[in-house]
Image (cartoon, grey):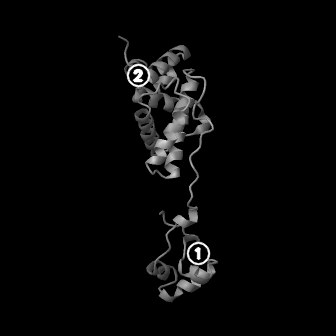
């Protein structure tokens, strides 16, 4: 029985690990073999390592933020769970559409769905880099558009925040609102840009 890709890669670290992703140490033919095995066995650890190696292989991409890494790992696990009956190397023609519909049925925000799809594209870009697949089934697939405009998600400042910006004058809300371009009833809903350029609070 052959070793799992994650286990097999340990031998490429050597006695003195210089921090280089072990996938980058492999001969291209061996990288392809282990990448195909990882996909066939749905080895999440090995597939994530392959994706990281693909990211590191091109210095133009720069360092990946820790938060992005965490989200991508979560997205990879979700894809493997959702495609538990799919062959990762040869997914069914309607597998991607079914995956997007499944994400939508979970009432995920369009931004979260976009992140899940970006993770899937990253995985297949890594598999293509390793020559394990020829095509990306997620190419050209986009998340649904968010029906809520960004400005609708911003919370207005309350009276205390307006007073703090206006030097303690709680009657300043209409004046500050007008200065920010708000008219009529909207003058009572003061948003971030109207208050000295402060970024709006996330919804």
Res. 19 visible in picture: no
- The image quadrant that residue 133 belongs to is top right
Residue 6: x and y in percent read 39, 23
Q: Is residue 149 above or below residue 9?
A: below
Residue 41: which disc? 2
Identify the residue shown where x is 57% and y is 35%.
138
Disc 1 to disc 2, how far (Cα)? 55 Å
Identify the residue shown where x is 60% and y is 40%.
141
Residue 15 left/right relative to 183 = left
Specify few, some or many for label 2: CA neighbours under 10 Å numbering under 14, 14-19, or 20 or more. Answer: some
Residue 18 left/right relative to 131 = left
Query: Of helix, strand and loop, which one carries label 1?
Result: helix
Res. 75 visible in picture: yes
Residue 91: x and y in percent read 52, 27
Query: Of helix, strand and loop, which one carries label 2?
Result: helix
Which of the two discs, 1 and 2, sits closer to the camera?
2
Q: Which residue is mark 1?
A: 194
Identify the residue shown where x is 49% and y is 26%.
88
Q: Is residue 118 above or below residue 37?
A: below
């Amino acid at each position: 029985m052959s070793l799992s890709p994650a286990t097999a890669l340990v031998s490429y670290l050597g006695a003195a690990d210089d921090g280089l992703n072990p996938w980058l140490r492999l001969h291209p033919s061996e990288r392809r073999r282990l990448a195909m095995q990882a996909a066939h066995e749905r080895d999440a650890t090995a597939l994530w390592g392959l994706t990281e190696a693909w990211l590191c292989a091109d210095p133009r991409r720069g360092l990946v933020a820790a938060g992005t890494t965490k989200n991508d790992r979560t997205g990879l696990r979700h894809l493997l769970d959702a495609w538990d009956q799919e062959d990762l190397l040869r997914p069914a023609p309607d597998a991607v559409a079914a995956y997007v519909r499944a994400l939508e049925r979970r009432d995920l925000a369009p931004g979260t769905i976009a992140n899940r799809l970006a993770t899937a594209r990253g995985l297949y870009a890594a598999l293509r880099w390793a020559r394990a697949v020829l095509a990306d089934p997620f190419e050209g697939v986009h998340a649904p558009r968010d029906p809520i405009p960004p400005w609708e998600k911003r919370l207005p400042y309350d009276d205390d925040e307006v007073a703090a910006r206006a030097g303690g004058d709680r009657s300043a809300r209409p004046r500050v609102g007008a200065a920010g371009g708000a008219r009529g009833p909207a003058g009572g809903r003061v948003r971030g840009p109207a208050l000295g350029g402060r970024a709006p609070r996330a919804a």
